[in-house]
């Protein structure tokens, strides 16, 4: 028979499978935590971004349920029309207080916060410089804005300076965008030096604290606080969906910045306000982050222990099939030569009762196991992970 305009779909899927790039969802049964049930199997969970274990905290659930009883399930419209509640304002004030900024604005997701902020801050006459390993939402924001976008080599400030020297003066405004904790590598952006460079070239800086908020800094404000940069002018973006255990995103910064976003960010103006349940859960989480530093301390101890044990295991092997990427966060990545090898390793760990994600191109340049630690992992669970990795080596 004849062909149709949709035939390419099946062909593309075949190509994805052949390249070991085909992906599919896997369902968790019930509550997510340090241990999960997945398709009848009990697994220790090293695959979530719920660093502080708040997604299953009963206090967040209670706040969400109370908000539903008070306000209903949907916010019914855009924030500028029928979708605004006092609860949104309370959350925005709490985020600004945590971050030590004038103000904050919440979006429906972190992805949308990046898209909305970047598109509102720069346009066709402008320049966006981004780390090559930045999150997809930062890249998409640059594209959507219509600005000239250039990547600098990962955390390479010499390269960033070269690009600034070569291109900055040909553009009206310049925005440097970076993850604070790189989500698929686990290392940190060298923020203080990056900010100096930005000042020298009259550039704005947008830092994505998706994996930093609640995890880094004495007060849990993030990597900006960790580096002592809280007083420097910059634009912070983040998500409510990782350490804060809810759903949504935010931008925090100066009064003028937030006021401008309320007037100019289409991804905020033309979309429905955050649901009452998500808003209330996130508000409770922000308070817990501030009031319970012991969660951050427990997480830090788990990270140190896991890194030490994993390194011991890998260095003892004659030719280790995995190589640990340098990281300084709860995201520990073990690089593997091929996508097929990393999928096989993840399956073997699953058979040992461990859930570790296999991350492959095009998400990352090289395949790797991505291990994420939580504050509520127990030492014996980390020992099981290390024993599982040992089985991959033997
Ligand atoms: C997860 C993530 C986002 C997106 O946040 P969502 O709220 O999940 O849309 C943005 N940036 C980084 C670095 C992330 O890891």
Image (tube, rainbow, N blue to C red):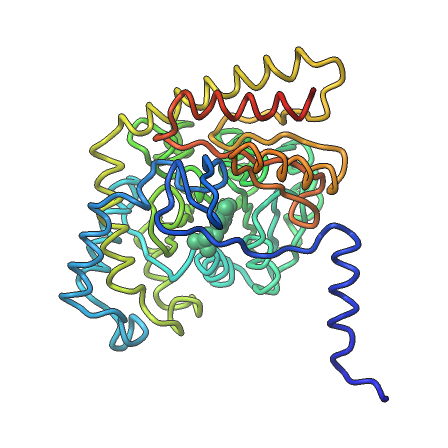
Quadrant of the drawing holding the N terminus? bottom right
User: Which quadrant of the figure has residue 345?
Assistant: top right
Eyeballing the image, is 227 above or below 24? above
User: Can residue 204 be seen from the camera position used here?
Assistant: no
x 53%, y 29%: residue: 193
Where is residue 315? Give x, y as percent.
66, 13
Nearest the camera: 199 or 358? 358
Quadrant of the drawing holding the C terminus? top right
x 34%, y 47%: residue: 245
Where is residue 116? Give x, y as percent.
46, 62
User: Which quadrant of the figure has residue 6?
Assistant: bottom right
x 15%, y 59%: residue: 66
Where is residue 133? Give x, y as percent.
63, 42
For this orientation, the residue located farthest to the front is 40
For this orientation, the residue located farthest to the right is 1
x 78%, y 77%: residue: 7
Where is residue 367? Give x, y as percent.
69, 39
Q: In the image, is 178 to the left or to the right of 224?
A: right
């Amino acid at each position: 028979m004849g062909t149709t305009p949709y035939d390419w779909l099946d062909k593309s899927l075949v190509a994805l499978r052949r390249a070991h790039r085909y992906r599919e969802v896997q369902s968790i049964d019930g509550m997510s935590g340090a241990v999960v049930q997945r398709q009848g199997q009990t697994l220790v969970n090293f695959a979530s971004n719920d660093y502080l274990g708040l997604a299953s905290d009963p206090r967040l659930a209670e706040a969400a349920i109370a908000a539903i009883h008070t306000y209903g399930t949907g916010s019914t419209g855009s924030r500028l029309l029928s979708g605004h509640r006092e609860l949104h304002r309370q959350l925005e004030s709490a985020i600004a207080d945590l971050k030590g900024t004038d103000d904050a604005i919440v979006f429906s997701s972190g992805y949308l916060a990046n898209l909305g902020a970047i598109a509102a801050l720069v346009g066709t006459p402008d320049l966006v410089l981004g780390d090559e390993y930045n999150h997809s939402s930062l890249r998409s924001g640059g594209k959507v804005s219509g600005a000239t976008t250039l990547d600098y080599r990962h955390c390479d400030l010499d390269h960033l300076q070269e690009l600034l020297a070569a291109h900055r003066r040909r553009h009206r405004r310049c925005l440097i965008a970076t993850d604070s904790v790189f989500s698929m590598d686990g290392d940190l952006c060298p923020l203080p030096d990056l900010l100096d460079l930005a000042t020298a070239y009259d550039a704005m800086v947008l830092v994505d604290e998706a994996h930093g908020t609640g995890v880094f800094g004495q007060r849990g404000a993030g990597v900006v606080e960790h580096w002592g940069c809280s007083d420097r002018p910059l634009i912070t973006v983040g998500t409510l969906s990782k350490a804060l255990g809810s759903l949504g995103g935010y931008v925090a910064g100066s009064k003028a910045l937030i006021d401008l976003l309320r007037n100019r960010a289409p991804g905020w103006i033309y979309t429905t306000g955050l649901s009452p349940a998500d808003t209330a859960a996130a508000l409770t989480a922000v308070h817990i982050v501030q009031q319970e530093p012991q969660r951050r301390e427990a997480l830090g101890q788990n990270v140190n222990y896991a890194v030490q044990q994993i390194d011991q295991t890998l260095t003892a092997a004659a030719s280790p099939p995995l190589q640990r990427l340098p990281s300084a966060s709860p995201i520990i990545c073990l690089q593997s030569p091929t996508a097929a090898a990393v999928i096989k390793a993840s399956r073997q760990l699953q058979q040992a009762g461990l859930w570790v994600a296999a991350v492959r191109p095009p998400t990352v340049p090289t395949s790797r196991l991505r291990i994420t630690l939580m504050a509520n992992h127990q030492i014996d669970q980390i020992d099981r992970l290390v024993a599982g990795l040992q089985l991959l080596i033997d």
